Image: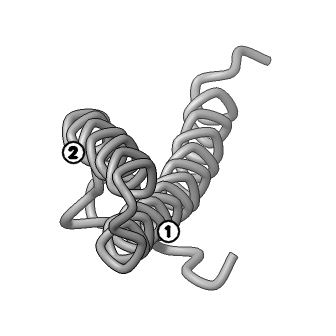
């Protein structure tokens, strides 16, 4: 890890929490996808292509944000485990 002296409290000042926004984005993706399919069935292929592209773009953004959150969680868990091990060594009887 690059930052040996970094602790849990100051590693990420702004941590992503994608549960709420992720659910909203999934609903938006669903609406755009269904709308795109309905436009395709109705024969408006150009409008269908636009809405399906937008659904794909929102999905790609969601995947990128989830990857960032997963990385943040991994780093924070590593820091917490290291701090826990340091505390255990400090208070170990022996």
User: Farthest bottom residue?
Assistant: 2
Q: Which mark is residue 27?
A: none
User: Farthest front residue?
Assistant: 43
* Residue 31 appears in the rendering: yes
* Residue 11 appears in the rendering: no
Q: Secondary structure at mark 1?
A: helix
Q: Earlier in the sequence, mark 1 or mark 2?
A: 2
Left or right of 36? Residue 16 is left
Give the image's coloring scheme: one colour
* Image quarter in which the C terminus is found: top right
Left or right of 76? Residue 14 is left
Q: Residue at x 50, y 68 (%)?
A: 60
Q: Residue at x 52, y 42 (%)?
A: 80
Q: Which mark is residue 60?
A: 1
Q: Secondary structure at mark 2?
A: helix
Q: Position of residue 35 (x, y in %)?
A: 29, 48
Q: Which residue is mark 2?
A: 21
Q: Position of residue 36 (x, y in %)?
A: 37, 55
Q: Nearer the viewer, residue 83 or 90?
A: 83
Left or right of 3? Residue 54 is left
Q: Residue at x 36, y 41 (%)?
A: 34
Crowding near pointer 2: few (<14 within 10 Å), some, many (20+)?
few
Q: Position of residue 84 (x, y in %)?
A: 58, 34
């Amino acid at each position: 890890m690059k930052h040996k002296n970094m602790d849990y409290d100051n590693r990420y000042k702004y941590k992503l929490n994608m549960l709420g926004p992720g659910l909203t984005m999934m609903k938006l993706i669903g609406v755009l996808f269904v709308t795109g399919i309905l436009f395709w069935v109705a024969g408006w292929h150009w409008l269908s292509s636009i809405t399906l592209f937008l659904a794909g773009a929102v999905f790609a953004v969601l995947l990128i944000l989830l990857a960032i959150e997963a990385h943040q969680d991994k780093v924070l868990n590593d820091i917490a485990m290291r701090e826990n091990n340091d505390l255990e060594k400090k208070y170990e009887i022996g």
